[in-house]
Structure formats: structure tokens, C-alpha cells
Image (cartoon, helix red, strand yellow):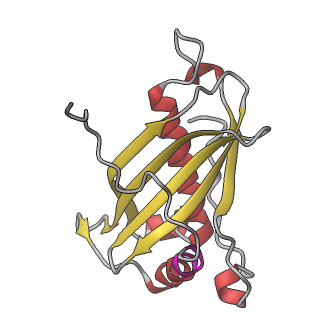
């Protein structure tokens, strides 16, 4: 595991959705540096490293909402079922990265999120990903309703994030335009 992987912890008792405070829109809860093993023969971050960094951004979101070690030990988790990554610019060794997270939608079992990766120093947008996740009961091996405390957190975040414009790449279809 990378040194940049977020550490799991429980939700702060003063989480915004619990205290009535404003939920940040978007969330800025994960940052890291590009590591040597993330860099390929072209001298920039590999495709897989972008996905890993976005995955750690998702892990930071899970920790933020209360999907922590205890939650997973009880057999609950989110599984990613679809991912679409758009690579916009290169990232290089030791470059600071900041992942901005938006909850686009949530229902009883599904979570639709969007991450944007920025250079942590100059704010240049490097990449985006749109992801659909399904909540699962790992003991039963099938989808299951999100537990109430996590659902409440996601509902509050989704409500806060609904005031933001929808990112321009959400729902984007990959194709070569016919001439």
C-alpha cells in the first residue's frame, strides 16, 4: 500500500451533517504527492496511478461519512461498479495533488460521485473521474441498503453539493465523431 493511502478513522462527533453546520461544497478531503512508483517510462504518472489516487479520494470520502474499519468489519462496504476517467494533463514525480470530491446523487443502495484532480500548488485541473458505487452486504454477497448513519451523511452532502453546477464531463460518452 502506498504511503499516500488515507488512514481509516471514525467520523468526528462534530461532522457538519450532525452539528447542523454547512457541509463543504465540494469536499477537499484528500491530497498526496506523486510517488516514484507511479511514474512510467514517459516520465509522467501512469494511467493506473490516476485511478489509485482517485480511489484514495473515495476512501477519504468513506472515512468522512463513517464507512470506517468498524463499518466494514460488520460486513458493509461500497463497491465501485463503473468508472470513467478523463486525463487532461500530466502529473510528475513529487507533484502535489489535491482531489476535490462531489456527491452527485445517492439513493438507497447507490452512490454517484465525481472527483477532480488538481495540481496542489497551482490549481491546474489534471484529471476527472465519475464513478457509480453500490453499497453491499459483504456477508450476503449482494447489494444492500446503506446503513442509516452513512445514508444521513451522504444525503446531507448530496443536498449541499446539489447547489454546484454539474461538472461538464458527467455522463460523457466516449466516441469518435463521424465526419
Q: Quadrant of residue 136?
A: bottom left
Q: Position of residue 120 (x, y in %)?
A: 75, 41
Q: Residue at x 54, y 55 (%)?
A: 59
Q: Is residue 160 magenta?
A: yes
Q: Is residue 96 magenta?
A: no
Figure check: 82 above or below 2: below
Name the residue furthest top.
41
Quadrant including the C terminus? top left
Q: Is residue 11 left or right of residue 66?
A: right
Quadrant including the N terminus? top right
Chief secondary structure of the magenta span? helix
Front one among 71 and 20 = 20
Q: Position of residue 18 (x, y in %)?
A: 66, 87
Magenta residues, as a range? 157-161
Figure check: 52 above or below 179: below
Q: Position of residue 72 (x, y in %)?
A: 45, 65
Name the residue furthest left.
178
Q: Quadrant of residue 78?
A: bottom left
Q: Residue at x 51, y 45 (%)?
A: 128
Q: Is residue 128 left or right of residue 173?
A: right
Q: Position of residue 87 (x, y in %)?
A: 48, 34
Q: Is residue 179 left or right of residue 84?
A: left
Figure check: 43 above or below 60: above
Amino acid at each position: 500500500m502506498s504511503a499516500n493511502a488515507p488512514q481509516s478513522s471514525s467520523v468526528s462527533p462534530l461532522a457538519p451533517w450532525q452539528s447542523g453546520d454547512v457541509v463543504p461544497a465540494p469536499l477537499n478531503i484528500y491530497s498526496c504527492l506523486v510517488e516514484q512508483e507511479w511514474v512510467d517510462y514517459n516520465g509522467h504518472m501512469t494511467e493506473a496511478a490516476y485511478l489509485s489516487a482517485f480511489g484514495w479520494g473515495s476512501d477519504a470520502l468513506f472515512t468522512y461519512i463513517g464507512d470506517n474499519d468498524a463499518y466494514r468489519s460488520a460486513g458493509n462496504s461500497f463497491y465501485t461498479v463503473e468508472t470513467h476517467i478523463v486525463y487532461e494533463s500530466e502529473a510528475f514525480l513529487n507533484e502535489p495533488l489535491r482531489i476535490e470530491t462531489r456527491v452527485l446523487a445517492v439513493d438507497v443502495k447507490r452512490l454517484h460521485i465525481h472527483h477532480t484532480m488538481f495540481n496542489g500548488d497551482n490549481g491546474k485541473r489534471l484529471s476527472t473521474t465519475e464513478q457509480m458505487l453500490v453499497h453491499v452486504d459483504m456477508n450476503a454477497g449482494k447489494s444492500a441498503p446503506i446503513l442509516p448513519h452513512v445514508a444521513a451523511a451522504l444525503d446531507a452532502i448530496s443536498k449541499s453539493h446539489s447547489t454546484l453546477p454539474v461538472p461538464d464531463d458527467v455522463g460523457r460518452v466516449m466516441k469518435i465523431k463521424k465526419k
